[in-house]
Amino acid sequence: MKLADTSNQAEHVVSHEDGWAVKAEGAEQPTKVYDNKQDAINRAKEIAQNKGTSAVIHTKEGSIQNQYNYSD
């Protein structure tokens, strides 16, 4: 596996200046930014399910609020 391979890295939902961002672990830029946190959570869970990884939901302060694991 190459170091640049991000296929098994978690999707994170983090606070963003424009709302809530879905961001792949290690990525510079968010995948998408949502106004609504639940929309961001739903998208992160969808991506994580497709990739067989996990979705990590953070509070506004940055601590982990919840985690959904979809790995085999």
Image: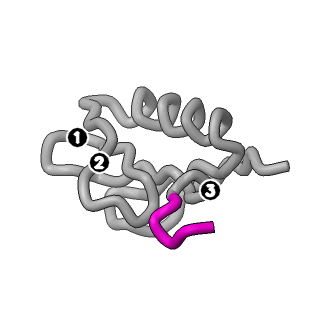
Residue at numbered disc 2: 30
Kind of residue sitting beneath label 3? Asn
Where is residue 60 drawn, in percent x and y? 33, 57
Name the residue tied to disc 1.
19
Does residue 36 belong to the magenta stretch? Answer: no
Q: Callout 1: few (<14), some (14-19), or many (20+) C-alpha neighbours within 10 Å?
A: some
The answer to which quarter of the image holds residue 63 is bottom left
Q: CA distance from mark 2 to mark 3?
A: 17 Å
Disc 3 packing (10 Å; few <14; some 14–19; many ≥20): some
The segment highlighted magenta reads 1-5
Circle on res. 44: none
From the image, tell me which residue sits under label 3. 8
The disc, 2 or 3, on the residue closer to the chain's N-terminal end is 3
Q: Going from the N terminus, do you reach mark 1 or mark 3 first?
A: 3
Q: Gap in Å between the C-alphas at discs 2 and 1? A: 12 Å
Amino acid type of the residue tagged 1 in the rendering: Gly
Against 44, residue 17 (above or below) is: below
Q: Earlier in the sequence, mark 2 or mark 1?
A: 1
Tell me the SS state at disc 2. Answer: loop
